[in-house]
Image (cartoon, rainbow, N blue to C red):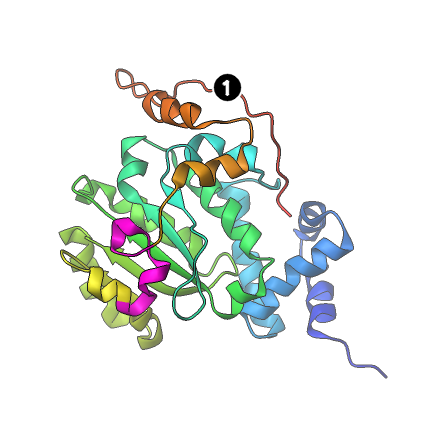
Amino acid sequence: MVDSSPLDELRYLLDTKPFSHEIHDFCSTTHNLDSFLSSFLRYKQNNVKNSMKMLQSYWSFRSEKIGNNRLSAADVRCPLLSKFLYIPDSTDVDGRQIVIIFFDRILEHRLSEAEILKTLWFFLENMMDMPVCQEKGICLISIFGNSMSSRSKGLVELVFESIQNKVPVKLGSVFLLNPPPWLRFFWAVSSNFMKSKLVRRVKLFSGDYQAQLIELIGKENLIKELGGDLQLDHDEWICAFYPDLNLDDIARSGRILYSTLSGSITSLVDSKVDIACQ
């Protein structure tokens, strides 16, 4: 008798769940389903029970907050033009993909909860196909600013809740730059109740933090705005997703994305591209 593999066991266990048909529709083909399930198994080191538990958490959160359909680049075009997210072509010294979030830009452009989540999950779900993101994880750099008052607490909680233990992409390291006082206080209290392994992954830096970042990430891996050597070309990065855009379009969209009078979203030209999430 041939022993079943963890993938076989997880596939069989999935078929006993009431949301099984939704996952099959979401993945479309057997190959995509196997790749999808393998992401959870790698993250949980082939523990089928724990993989299933995380998959349930993932699908419950996704169904409620985002929906059951695959995300495409067209779905996140509007929030991505706000430049609140940037993923440079670099890793930290441990080989983790760097992801940068500019929290001030989320507030400046008044992005909705749905826009933030869809944008984050579009990229995270693409990273699920990369084994290194389950094994080594990502290096998340969150940049805060003067506008991050205590009223923004829900926004920060939303971002981290949507990532932690939901998507099988490990938070290998987290750097919070210029965190507001309320976040420092929250971390000082809550970290006492967290696992030491998780606490060691999170660093809070203020003021002249460039030297510390360079030591932990590498100067060649950091964008110049954070004291590194890497040139940040946000416009070029966005144009790679939307070939119909040019630099003038991006600059203009940044000015008119939201009406300063009403705070309502200004309509943009519909995207003609539809880059499917693989």
Amino acid type indicated by mark 1: Val
Front residue of 11 and 156 = 156
State the SS at label 1: loop
Q: Is residue 270 above or below residue 231?
A: above
What span is colored magenta in the figure? 215-229
Q: Quadrant of residue 229?
A: bottom left
Question: Image check: 38 left or right of 92?
Answer: right
In the rendered image, residue 246, in percent from the top left (x then y), is placed at 47, 27
Residue toward you, 157 or 70: 70
What residue is drawn where x is 71% and y is 60%? 34
Label 1 crowd (10 A; few <14 / some 14-19 / many >=20)? few
Asked whether, in this view, residue 37 is left or right of residue 217, the answer is right
Q: Is residue 194 visible?
A: no
Residue 38, how many percent across, how many down? 64, 64
| Quadrant the N terminus occupies | bottom right
Q: Nearer the viewer, residue 243 or 184?
A: 243
In this picture, is 215 found above or below 242? below
Instruction: Read off the residue under disc 1.
Output: 269
Across and down, in percent, residue 275 comes to 62, 38
Magenta span: predominant SS is helix
- Furthest toward the top, the residue is 261
- Image label count: 1
* Residue occupying the point 64% across, 48% down: 278
